Image: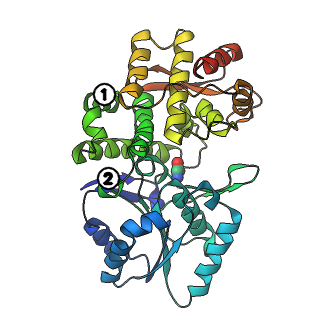
Amino acid sequence: MNQVKVNLDDRSYPIIIANDNFEHLAKKLVRLNLGTDAIIITNSRIRALYGKKLQKTLNTLKIATHIFNVQDSEKSKSISEYVKIIGKISSIDTKKRLFLIALGGGVVGDLTGFIAATYKRGIAYIQIPTTLLAQVDSSIGGKTALDLPSGKNLIGAFYQPKLVYSNINLIKSLPARQIRSGLAEAVKYGIIVDPKLFSYIEKNYKKILDLDSSCLSYVIKASSLIKAKIVENDERETTGLRTILNFGHTIGHALETAAGYSNLNHGEAISIGMAAAAEIAHSMGILPGIELKRVMAIFKLLKLPLEAKKGDLKAVLSAFLRDKKFINGRIRMVLPSKIGHVFVTENIPYNLIKKIIKKRMAD
Ligand code: GLY
């Protein structure tokens, strides 16, 4: 078992990286004493796999359980789903001390976190991420959110969990494509701050893709440490440090948003975005060619795409320009200067961005 701590005064919490049958979760829950009743929010697929085991673990601790399913889709981060679940929670909330458990990926984590942040002005919740992407990124940091028809994550709160329990066994049943998607975020951490993590992935990519437990554990721990440090120094996105986490996301999000690219998952879209940002940095004379080569090569090793399929360049560019990362109409991107270092800049010629995005859309 490995443990990483997120240090935030009275909002501090541990991230446990385990490879067990919920024993370390049980131990921690006894110490945390979060309540008498746990409300588990999950989806039907994850519930079928791990619901019973989790309920049994909690019941052994004399914690009663209630389990609510949501759809395994971004649609679940809606106001209507929120109202529905809050209604169910309040109907069972009689003389009980409730806490919430997010058992799932990013959607379940965001929704559960926002319910926890707002029900009775805030109750405790824990994250049990069941995707690699959630284990290395979205379960850590306390940003919780719902979507509006006009945009993603437009309603939200900063609200930290009391515990993140990342169990490697829970991601072993994931399709290979989802594992690769999570690895894209780990590669991102390597490029933005951790050349050692980048080299580790380069060296061990085969074992990682084969879900070797000690390799996964290394990658999840290294990623959790980086995310924890960044959140500690910019919990509420006020110092600008969290911005570096957007590396690859500006062009990546444009691809995710533009019609015709629903074939890309998040990790795939940001891989193309990171490749494009690295090329932009190289074209501007900032990133040496040898580093660009390594960046491009790692995506190939991990079977992540470097190109989106040919499509509507105009739609991608307009999604890019509508992105909320644009401050006062200026194009703001995170660019690498070497593996392990990035910086935020607003001085990128738009024609260069256009040229590189076009290049990253296969002809
Ligand atoms: N919940 C994800 C984050 O705070 O970054």
Q: Secondary structure at mark 1?
A: helix
Q: Secondary structure at mark 2?
A: loop
Quarter of image, res 121: bottom right
Picture coordinates of residue 302, whole percent (x, y): 37, 32
Is residue 162 at least partly visible in the picture? no
Picture coordinates of residue 109, whole percent (x, y): 51, 59
Count residues near mark 1 (Cα–Cα under 10 Å), then give few for <14, some for 14-19, many for 20+.
some
Q: Is residue 118 above or below residue 348?
A: below
Quarter of image, res 57: bottom left
Q: Is residue 26 above or below residue 292?
A: below
Mark linked to residue 202? 1
Quarter of image, res 297: top left
Q: Amino acid at mark 1?
A: Glu
Q: Name the residue rendered at 25%, 42% in the picture.
A: 215
Q: Name the residue rendered at 52%, 37% in the picture.
A: 245
Picture coordinates of residue 212, whole percent (x, y): 24, 44
Q: Residue furthest bottom?
A: 95
Q: Is mark 2 within 8 Å of ligand 1?
A: no
Q: Name the residue rendered at 29%, 57% in the picture.
A: 169
Q: Amino acid at mark 2?
A: Lys
Name the colouring of the figure: rainbow
Residue that mark 2 sits on: 172
Question: Considering only order in the chain, which callout, 2 or 1, is on the residue closer to the N terminus?
Answer: 2
Left-right relation of 321 to 234: right
Q: Name the residue rendered at 43%, 69% in the picture.
A: 47
